[in-house]
């Protein structure tokens, strides 16, 4: 437990309760209410956990007002410029940047696990060809617990590590297989002479009939997308992984739960939803109609790719991603296609519009990642699987941290019950 640095007082009726307070290394102080129910017989109410820290963590820090994102203390902008995805994986998992020997060893271990069990190919073939790749991924990653029995014991640190390496290594293979299956092409085996992101692009875009050479600009952009999505503190999918893991569920089942949560359009599914929205808007002259809908309280429509629960200034990932978008569009010779025109104009209008300014709604990472992935040739259905394979390391690092935390218990929120009070059952002919 962190050191107690103060006391908060809560008065309910005639009684006052002392609540311990802790100071984090960064961010606001925390009031500990864990014993409040026992002492005062009240619950706290916080739908969406907007004011509740559900765990202590030393992995990622976000300052939403400053637009700051740190992995283990290192700013995302520095990592995105000078590091690479597997180094970021090491950092998130083990807490420090690796030295040369540690990096070589880690890369070798990940690379040796990129292939999937041959029997998994048959498992894939059970899905309909038109399944959404996220549906396939939830199923296949969950099914890893049926294929890798020797890394299911969460109490054995060695097995935990093997499971972590397996998932980091195999998620790109599984995502690429889901894609190939959906377009009716043969699976492409991993090529271990390639780096992590080039290997993923190769598995997605190569065909056995032709030589495929990965463009270094595209592989750099893919690597950046992976780094920028690698972890993001206690977001919905990470909290889902932690909650699933708190019961002692095996790591593959926990990550499958995270993938399921990520799929939603308010979370990882926003990149797909954003590009589909840009296409639906279609032409610049229709933007005002969609802006009006986004402002209309009676219309559930939201501008996808705008806004964030934590960033209320700008999303630092979006700034880096915008740079990559420019590089990739230049390389692909895409200067003014209709979707890009709509995206640029929408971004301009929303940044000048009072509604968006007053509510602090800025383009988020998904606004730009969709544009890049589209330019690379990925169909929109693959956007969220790419987010999932990038976030896998963050989920695992958080899961590992939770298992090693001696304060960890099974997650069990309470509720503000608003249903019927006690009533007697009546047989059907008396109702
Ligand atoms: N378009 C129009 N209005 C919006 C939007 C939007 N994208 N986002 C929020 N608002 C309004 C909302 O209607 C509300 O207005 P009011 O105060 O008048 O009721 C106000 O802004 C605050 O919204 P909120 O729903 O309380 O904010 P939240 O923190 O719960 O939601 C969010 C955050 C990301 C779910 C939301 O901004 C949203 O739905 N954005 C679109 C989906 C999206 O792009 N998601 C990707 C997030 S980044 C990737 C990731 O981390 O997964």
Image (cartoon, rainbow, N blue to C red):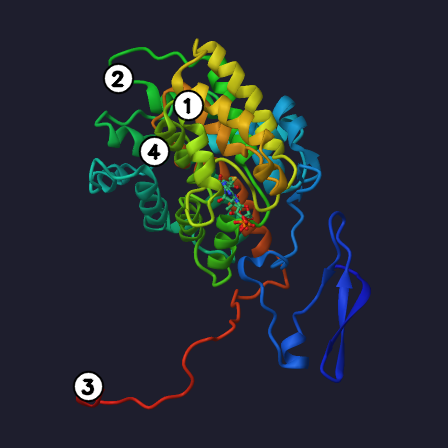
Whichever of callouts 3 and 4 sits on the residue coming sooner in the sequence is: 4
**Which of the labelled discs sits on residue 428, or is there none?**
3
Whichever of callouts 1 and 2 sits on the residue coming sooner in the sequence is: 2
Q: Which is nearer the eye, 226 or 159?
A: 226
Whichever of callouts 2 and 3 sits on the residue coming sooner in the sequence is: 2
Separation of marks 4 and 1 at Cα, in angstroms: 27 Å
Q: What is the crowding at mark 1: few (fewer than 14 residues within 10 Å), some, or many (at least 20)?
A: few
Asked if the beta carbon under badge 1 is closer than 8 A to the nearest atom of ligand 1, the reply is: no
Q: Position of residue 229 (x, y in %)?
A: 53, 35
Provide the residue designation for mark 2.
208
Separation of marks 2 and 4 at Cα, in angstroms: 23 Å
Provide the residue designation for mark 1.
285
Instruction: Answer with the quarter of the image where residue 126 lies.
Output: top left
Q: Secondary structure at mark 3?
A: helix
Lateral position of residue 125 relative to residue 408, left or right: left
Q: Are marks 1 and 2 in contact (CB under 8 Å)?
A: no
Q: Position of residue 9 (x, y in %)?
A: 78, 72
Separation of marks 3 and 1 at Cα, in angstroms: 59 Å
């Amino acid at each position: 437990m962190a050191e107690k640095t103060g006391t908060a007082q809560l008065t309910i009726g005639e009684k006052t309760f002392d609540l311990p307070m802790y100071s984090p290394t960064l961010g606001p102080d925390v009031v500990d209410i864990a014993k409040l129910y026992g002492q005062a017989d009240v619950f706290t109410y916080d739908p969406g956990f907007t004011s509740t820290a559900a765990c202590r963590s030393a992995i990622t820090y976000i300052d939403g007002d400053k637009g700051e994102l740190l992995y283990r203390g290192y700013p995302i902008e520095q990592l995105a410029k000078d590091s690479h995805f597997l180094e970021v994986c090491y950092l998130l998992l083990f807490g420090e940047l690796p030295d040369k020997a540690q990096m070589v060893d880690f890369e070798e271990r990940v690379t040796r696990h990129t292939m999937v069990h041959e029997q998994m190919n048959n498992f894939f073939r059970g899905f309909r060809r038109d399944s959404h790749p996220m549906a396939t991924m939830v199923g296949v990653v969950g099914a890893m617990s049926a294929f890798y029995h020797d890394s299911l014991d969460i109490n054995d640190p060695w097995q935990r590590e093997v499971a972590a390496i397996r998932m980091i290594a195999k998620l790109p293979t599984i995502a690429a297989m889901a894609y190939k299956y959906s377009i009716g092409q043969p699976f492409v085996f991993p090529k271990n002479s390639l780096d992590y992101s080039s290997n993923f692009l190769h598995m997605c875009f190569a065909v056995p009939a032709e030589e495929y050479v990965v463009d270094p600009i595209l592989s750099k952009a893919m690597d950046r997308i992976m780094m920028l999505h690698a972890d993001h503190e206690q977001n919905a999918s990470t909290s889902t992984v932690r909650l699933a893991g708190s019961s002692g569920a095996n790591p593959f089942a926990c990550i499958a739960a995270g993938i399921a949560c990520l799929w939603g359009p308010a979370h990882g599914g926003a990149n797909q939803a954003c590009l589909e929205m840009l296409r639906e808007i279609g032409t610049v002259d229709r933007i005002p109609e969609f802006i009006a809908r986004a402002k209309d309280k009676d219309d559930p429509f939201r501008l996808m790719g705008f806004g964030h629960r934590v960033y209320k200034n700008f999303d630092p990932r979006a700034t880096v991603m915008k740079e990559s978008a420019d590089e990739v569009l230049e390389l692909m010779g895409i200067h003014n296609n209709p979707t890009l025109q709509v995206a640029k104009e929408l971004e301009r209008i929303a940044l000048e519009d009072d509604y968006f300014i007053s509510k602090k709604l800025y383009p988020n990472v998904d606004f730009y990642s969709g544009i890049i992935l589209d330019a690379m040739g990925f169909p929109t259905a693959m956007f969220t699987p790419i987010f999932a394979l990038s976030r896998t390391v963050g989920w695992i690092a958080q899961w590992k941290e939770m298992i090693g935390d001696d304060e960890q218990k099974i997650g069990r929120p309470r509720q503000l019950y608003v249903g019927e009070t006690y009533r007697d059952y009546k047989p059907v002919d008396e109702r």
